[in-house]
């Protein structure tokens, strides 16, 4: 996935970087990431040992990013990074551009969780988007700074981003993206511990949004 992203980055930007965040992987991912970083000067690696969660990985990427625009995508190769051009077309007129999957290629249980998340976020945080947890989003760095730092360590990070963006009255655009079936690794988004952690973090976020910092 990273190798495919490099020529696209070279095409769309004079200056660019790819930050690979390894969140405590148990295979050879980290070793391969460091190997890529040795070959390509524009690649940096951030590693968590042990695993901390999806939210912690995104936070680490955001905090280490140095350029005017920040785009993130999951490392499981379920997105086509050439479609970053769609985000670039919209980002000048928005603070954040979020993808929505044209046809989600996930287990039916993940579809159910997404439907429940939409209802949950509408009830607790008052926003509705077509695809809240799509792992393909783009930000203006100056806009992202207005809603950082984030607190979610787990899957609730995407809801936190959007809840804080709504609170800050940021403009959010949406673009349709392709989604592909996962060929390698295991998905953890439907894991019961991940779901319970997300519910706990959502209550913390609601309290923070309404009674803590904005």
Image (cartoon, grey):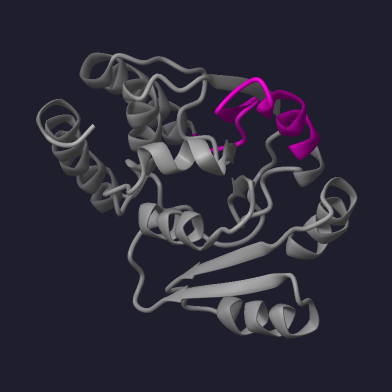
x and y, in percent, of residue 49 in the image: 37, 79
Tell me what residue is drawn at x 85 percent, y 46 percent: 12
Count of numbered circles in the view: 0
| 85 magenta-colored | yes
Q: Is residue 19 above or below residue 120?
A: below
Q: Quadrant of residue 112?
A: top left
Nearest the eye: 123 or 88: 88
Q: Is residue 102 visible to the viewer in this orientation of the structure?
A: no
x and y, in percent, of residue 168 in the image: 36, 25
Tell me what residue is drawn at x 70 percent, y 41 percent: 180
Q: Is residue 54 above or below residue 98?
A: below
Nearest the eye: 68 or 136: 68
118 left or right of 78 in image:
left
x and y, in percent, of residue 141 in the image: 55, 44
Tell me what residue is drawn at x 68 percent, y 23 percent: 176
Tell me what residue is drawn at x 54 percent, y 35 percent: 134
Q: Is residue 54 above or below residue 42?
A: above
Quadrant containing the C terminus in the rendered view: top left
137 left or right of 122 in image:
right
Quadrant containing the N terminus in the rendered view: bottom right
Q: Which residues are magenta?
A: 84-107
| 4 magenta-colored | no
x and y, in percent, of residue 111 in the image: 46, 28
Q: Is residue 115 above or below residue 62?
A: above
Nearest the eye: 27 or 145: 145
114 left or right of 124 in image:
right
Q: Is residue 176 visible to the viewer in this orientation of the structure?
A: yes
Q: Quadrant of residue 56?
A: bottom left
145 left or right of 164 in image:
right
Q: Quadrant of residue 96?
A: top right
């Amino acid at each position: 996935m990273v190798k495919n992203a490099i020529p696209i980055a070279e095409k769309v930007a004079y200056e660019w970087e790819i930050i690979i965040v390894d969140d405590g992987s148990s295979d050879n991912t980290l070793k391969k990431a460091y190997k890529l970083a040795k070959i390509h000067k524009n690649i940096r690696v951030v590693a968590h040992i042990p695993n901390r969660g999806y939210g912690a990985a995104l936070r680490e990427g955001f905090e280490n990013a140095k350029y005017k625009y920040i785009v993130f995508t999951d490392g499981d190769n379920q997105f086509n990074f050439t479609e970053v051009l769609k985000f670039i077309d919209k980002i000048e007129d928005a603070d954040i551009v979020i993808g929505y999957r044209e046809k989600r290629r996930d287990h039916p249980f993940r579809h159910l969780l997404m439907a429940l998340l939409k209802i949950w976020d509408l009830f607790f945080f008052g926003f509705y988007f077509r695809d809240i947890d799509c792992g393909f989003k783009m930000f203006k760095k100056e806009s992202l700074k207005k809603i950082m730092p984030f607190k979610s360590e787990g899957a609730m990070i995407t809801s936190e981003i959007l809840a804080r963006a709504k609170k800050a009255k940021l403009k959010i655009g949406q673009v349709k993206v392709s989604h592909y079936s996962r060929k390698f690794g295991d998905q953890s988004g439907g894991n019961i511990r991940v779901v319970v952690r997300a519910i706990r973090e959502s209550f913390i976020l609601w309290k923070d949004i309404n009674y803590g910092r904005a």
